[in-house]
Image (tube, rainbow, N blue to C red):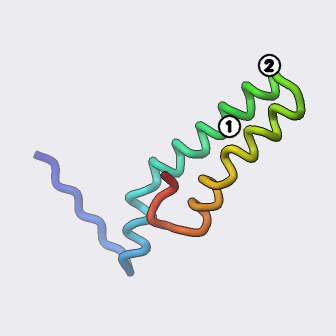
């Protein structure tokens, strides 16, 4: 059995700490998509990836309950 206790100043702080792995996954996925588009595609492909990932990135910045 695993018990995890997180002491934070507020619920928002706790949510931020708990969603840390999701933020890392979002950034990693975005990086991989950009790297692949840049390596194998054109500038237009890179722009398509930015447009594809922008809503998820905006959601992560605007809402600290998690990026996905």
Instruction: Give above or below for 38 relative to 49.
Output: above
Figure disc tally: 2
Image quadrant where residue 65 sits: bottom left
Residue 33 percent across, percent down from the top left: 68, 32
Residue at 59% over, 37% down: 29
Specify whether 41 is left or right of 32: right
First in sequence: mark 2 vs mark 1: 1
Residue 35 percent across, percent down from the top left: 74, 29
Task: Give the quadrant of the N terminus.
Answer: top left
Neighbour class for label 2 at 10 Å: few (<14), some, many (≥20)? few
Frontmost of labels 2 and 1 is 2
Specify whether 29 is left or right of 35: left
Specify whether 32 is left or right of 64: right
Residue named by callout 2: 40
Neighbour class for label 1 at 10 Å: few (<14), some, many (≥20)? few
Residue named by callout 1: 31
The furthest residue to the top? 40
Q: Secondary structure beneath disc 2?
A: helix
Task: Tell me how far mark 2 sits from mark 1, CA to CA.
Answer: 14 Å
Of residues 50 and 24, the one nearer the viewer is: 50
Q: Secondary structure beneath disc 1?
A: helix
Residue at 43% over, 56% down: 19
Residue 11 percent across, percent down from the top left: 36, 76
Specify whether 19 is left or right of 36: left
Residue 61 percent across, percent down from the top left: 61, 64
Image quadrant where residue 16 sits: bottom left
Of residues 16 and 55, the one nearer the viewer is: 55
Residue at 65% over, 40% down: 30
């Amino acid at each position: 059995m695993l018990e995890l206790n997180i002491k934070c100043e507020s619920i928002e702080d706790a949510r931020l700490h708990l969603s840390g792995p999701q933020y890392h996954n979002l950034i990693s996925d975005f990086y991989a998509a950009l790297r692949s588009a840049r390596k194998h595609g054109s500038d237009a492909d890179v722009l398509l990836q930015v447009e594809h990932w922008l809503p998820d990135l905006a959601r992560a910045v605007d809402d600290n309950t998690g990026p996905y």
